[in-house]
Image (spheres, rainbow, N blue to C red):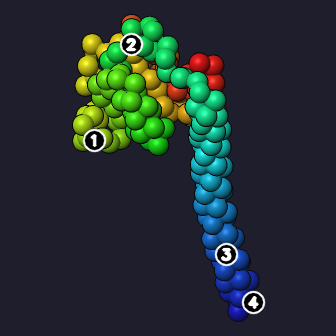
Amino acid sequence: MEKEKSVIAKWFIFSFIISILLFYINIDKKRLQALIKSNEKNLLLYLLSTQWLYRKINGENIFMFLEKGGYNRIAVYGKNHSCECLCSELRNMGIEVVCIVDDKSNGRYGSIPIMKKDSMPKDVDAIIITNLVNGELIKKDLEDVYAKAVFTLEDIIKWG
């Protein structure tokens, strides 16, 4: 009987240790996946930023097509570092950034209101999406809802 209790106790301890190991392996797997996703996003941001800087250094006015196309009132979709650079660039060109659309934040960025997609004004001339990871999905979604010009920042920077 004592031997059986000892075997059961050892089996219980062994099972408990295995359960804990599996729990931590699962957590580490989730952390690793989050790190990989973050790394991919940072790489996209780096590549976009260097392309943008390279084109500016070489004297290109990347956003001139907005002026030429009559896009004077712009909504920027996604508040992030690229959004801040884009707003500064457009402001310097005299193009009005009507709002920044971001469902995760609100308030203001300087004088520009930050609002949710449902509240975005309908009278904007174009929407520029700064989200690098899901830009094409957001573009498709916005094109279905708004019959306006919708651009991704990535396409503008890469292809002008």
Q: Which badge, 2 or 3, is on the more N-terminal residue?
A: 3
Q: Position of residue 30 (x, y in %)?
A: 61, 54
Q: Residue at x 33, y 26 (%)?
A: 97
Circle 1 packing at 10 Å, graded few (<14), some (14-19), many (20+), is few
Q: Quote the CA–CA distance across marks 2 and 1.
A: 21 Å
Tag 2–tag 3 contact (CB < 8 Å): no
Q: Which mark is residue 71?
A: 2
Looking at the rendered structure, the kind of residue marked 2 is Tyr
Look at discs 1 and 3 and give the one toward the viewer: 1
Q: Which mark is residue 17?
A: 3
Q: Quote the CA–CA distance across marks 2 and 4.
A: 83 Å
Q: Which badge, 4 or 1, is on the more N-terminal residue?
A: 4
Q: Quadrant of the C terminus?
A: top right
Residue in front for this viewpoint, 134 or 158: 158
Q: Quote the CA–CA distance across marks 1 and 3.
A: 54 Å
Tag 2–tag 4 contact (CB < 8 Å): no
Look at discs 4 and 3 and give the one toward the viewer: 3
Q: Which badge, 4 or 3, is on the more N-terminal residue?
A: 4
Q: Position of residue 4 (x, y in %)?
A: 72, 85
Look at discs 4 and 1 and give the one toward the viewer: 1
Q: Secondary structure at mark 2?
A: loop
Looking at the rendered structure, the kind of residue marked 1 is Gly
Q: Residue at x 34, y 35 (%)?
A: 103
Looking at the rendered structure, the kind of residue marked 3 is Ile
Q: Quote the CA–CA distance across marks 4 and 1.
A: 74 Å
Vertical relation: 61 (above or below) 143: below
Q: Which badge, 2 or 1, is on the more N-terminal residue?
A: 2
* Residue occupied by mark 4: 3
